[in-house]
Image (cartoon, rainbow, N blue to C red):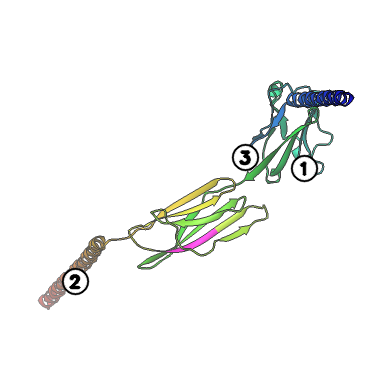
Amino acid sequence: MRLQRCRSALSIVLLQHVIDCFFLLTSHRVSSSDVPLLIGPSQTVVAFVGDDVTLPCRLEPATDASAMRLEWARPDLSPGFVHVWADRREHVLDKQPSYRGRTSLLTDRLHLGDISLKLVNVTLSDEGPYRCLVPELGRKAFVKLAVCVVSTPVIRVMSRTSSSVVLQCESAGWYPEPELLWLDGEGKLLSAGPPETVRGPDDLYTVSSRVTVEKRHSNTFTCRVQQNNINQTREAHIRVAVLSRYVKGVLALGLLGVVLGLASTIHGCMREHVSKDQENDTTCSAVHQAQENTVRAFK
C-alpha cells in the first residue's frame, strides 16, 4: 500500500516537473519571438563606379530604431566601422576614413525599422561584405556589395581577302574581369582564339579578340562582352558587305564605261589640239608667202 502511494507521489512530482519544463520552454520561445528579426537582401547588391547605392537592412516586424545604436561595418577592414548611429546622430570617431562624408541612414524611415545604408560616389574599394548590427536586440544581417565598371565594345575590320575578313573586337574599362564571345547572324558561337585580357594600373580590364570569318550569306557578326557575376552584357555588331555576281558585273560594266568615256574624251581633245596646230601652220605659211610677194613687187 505504501509502495503504491510512493509511486503515485512520484508520478505527480514527475508530471509537475514536465509541466514546469513545458512552461519554461514556452515562455522562452515567446520572449525570443518578441525580438524583431533583422532582414538583409537575399542577393548581392550591384553598383556601378561613381553611382550611389543603398544597402538594404530592416527590422521585421517594423520597430522604431531611431533611438537605438545602429552599426554598419566592414568585417574585412580595420577600423571596420562604416557608419555608427547612436543618441540619434552619427558618430565618426572610429569610422573607416575612406567612407567619411559618403554614408548616411534614411533618418526619416528609422521609425519604420528601415536602417538601410546609403553610400554615395561608389569606388572599386567599396566592394566587399557589410554587416548591419543592432546591439540592443542582438540582431545582425550581412550584405554583399559588388562594384562594376562596363564599356561598349568596338569592332574593326583588320584585313580582307576575296573569301574572308579578319575582325577585331576590343572593350576597355571593365571590372570584374569579363569574357568575350563572337556570334554569327544566327546567334551561334564562332570559333576564335582565346581573348587577350590586360589589367591596367586602375584595376580595370581591357579585353580583345580577333576572328576570321568567311563571306557568306550570314554576314552579320556580333561581339559580346559579358560579366555573369554582375549580370552585365554589352554588344557591338558589324555587317560585312558581300557582293553578288550580278552586282559585281554591273560595277565592272560601269567601271568599263567610265574608262571608255575617259579615253574617248582624251582622244577627242588630242585630235582637236592637232587640228588647231595644223590650222596655225597653214596660216603662218600664207602670211610668209604674202610677205615674199610684197618684197618682189618693190624690186
What whole-number distance in Å separates the C-alpha atoms at marks 1 and 3? 18 Å
Give the residues in magenta. Answer: 208-213
The amino acid beneath tag 2 is Val
What whole-number distance in Å separates the C-alpha atoms at marks 1 and 2? 97 Å
| Place of residue 66 in the rendered image (x, y in percent of width and height, measured from the top left) | 75, 22
Q: Mark 1: few, some, or many residues within 10 Å (few <14, many ≥20)? A: some
Answer yes or no: is residue 210 visible: yes
Q: Mark 2: few, some, or many residues within 10 Å (few <14, many ≥20)? A: few
| Place of residue 15 in the rendered image (x, y in percent of width and height, measured from the top left) | 80, 25
Task: Please tell me the numbered disc located at residue 43.
Answer: 3
State yes or no: residue 266 in magenta. Answer: no
Residue 283 occupies which quadrant of the picture? bottom left
SS for callout 3 = loop
What whole-number distance in Å separates the C-alpha atoms at marks 3 and 2? 89 Å
Instruction: Point out the image quarter for the N terminus.
Output: top right
Report the residue marked by disc 2: 274
Q: Nearer the viewer, mark 3 or mark 2?
A: 3
Q: Of residues 249 and 291, which is closer to you in this image?
A: 249
Q: Of residues 253 and 267, which is closer to you in this image?
A: 253
SS for callout 2 = helix
The amino acid beneath tag 1 is Pro
SS for callout 1 = loop
Task: Please tell me the numbered disc located at residue 75.
Answer: 1
Q: Of residues 69 and 282, which is closer to you in this image?
A: 69
Q: Are marks 1 and 2 in contact (CB under 8 Å)?
A: no
Q: Earlier in the sequence, mark 3 or mark 2?
A: 3
The residue positioned 62% from the left and 46% from the top of the image is 148
Answer yes or no: is residue 116 visible: no
Q: Earlier in the sequence, mark 1 or mark 3?
A: 3
